[in-house]
Image (cartoon, rainbow, N blue to C red):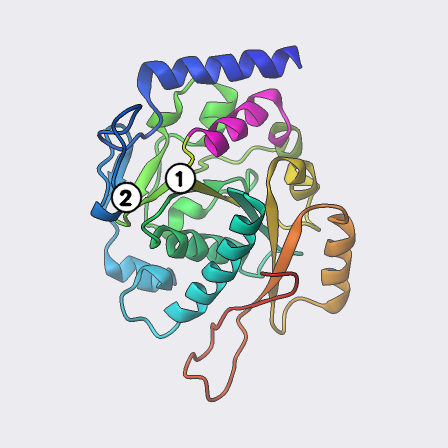
Amino acid sequence: MERIRKALEQAERERAQQGEGAPAGAGAGNPVDLSTGLRYTYTRTVEVPQRVLLDNRLIAAVPGHELKDAYRMLRTRVLQTLRENHWTSLAVTGPASGCGKTLTAINLAISLAMEVTHTVLLVDLDLRKPSVHGYFGYQPELGLSDYLKGDVPLHKILFTPSIERLVVLPGREPIENSSEMLRSPKMVALVNEIKHRYPDRLVVFDLPPILAADDALAFAPYTDAMLLVAEAGGTSRDDLQKALEVLKGAPVIGTVLNKAYSPGTGYGYAKQRAAAAGA
């Protein structure tokens, strides 16, 4: 507990000295009108061409895309569950690699950021295979690994794509002892900081696959809710059952069926559907 207390105090000192990607004008007595758009004083802005969004299937950010409504539906159901329970954080994972959990996490974060009543922080916690930044066509010079293993201030790592109200905390280089790092005092202090600093912020964590390592299980106590992604035609019933057994007792609010084809809906191949337990 003493180590966690010291880590929290250090995070507080960094925040006071440098800020953590705070919106311009933010602070006590100077609220920000989220409906007018935000400018960031510390956070790097990365312009993402629409071609990159389309090529990397970030369809929630593409105006008029035929699949956008699927993510809006997912967003609405997730928001209802979070608000009913006064939660502000959600972790996205899946049974095994290839299910589309990272793409789902990114598109969900983008869709959540489209709501003008809050901001969204997307955190890449797939420490062994960080990939969130690549979907935005961006290669960071610094990442979460630099923060956890060094003294790099958080504001030097964060970036915001050309999507209002969305900030990304990327990884960079892989971390082998990922599960130990996820429950380290510095990580616990960081999670407490980013979850509670802004009352109008939602946090989306992209976690590694459940059956690949114990990372998701190790991190489960530090998130308010978890969303499980299954691939239609790819995730076996046995793997899904095993994943749910591993996460038994964790706050799993539902399952997303990814890559589900529904003839006649007009959504084509990559339709996302939410199911179970309010998600």
Residue occupying image coordinates x 56% and y 51%: 84
> Are the residues tagged 2 and 1 within 8 Å (C-beta)?
yes
Q: Residue at x 34, y 63 (%)?
A: 55
- List the residue tagged with mark 1: 200
Say if 179 sits above or below 138 in the image.
Answer: above
Which corner quadrant holds the C terminus?
bottom right
Residue visible at 43% across and 28% down? 197
Report whether 75 appears left or right of 35.
right
Q: Position of residue 222 (x, y in %)?
A: 62, 35
Closer to the camera, 211 or 114?
Answer: 114
- Marks 2 and 1, how far apart in space? 9 Å
How crowded pointer 1 is (Cα within 10 Å; few <14, some 14-19, many 20+) is rated as few
- Furthest toward the bottom, the residue is 264
Residue 42 makes an appearance in the image: yes
> Is residue 125 rendered to the left or right of residue 245?
left
Q: Earlier in the sequence, mark 2 or mark 1?
A: 2
In the foreground, 252 or 124: 252
Question: Circle 2 sits in a helix, a strand or a loop, which is it?
Answer: helix
Q: Residue type at mark 2?
A: Leu
Q: Any magenta on residue 185?
A: yes
Q: What is the x, y in percent for residue 36?
A: 21, 46
Q: Please tell me whether residue 149 is drawn above or below residue 117 in the rendered image.
A: above
Q: Is residue 208 visible?
A: no
Which residue in the structure is indicated by mark 2?
34
Which SS does the magenta portion mostly show? helix
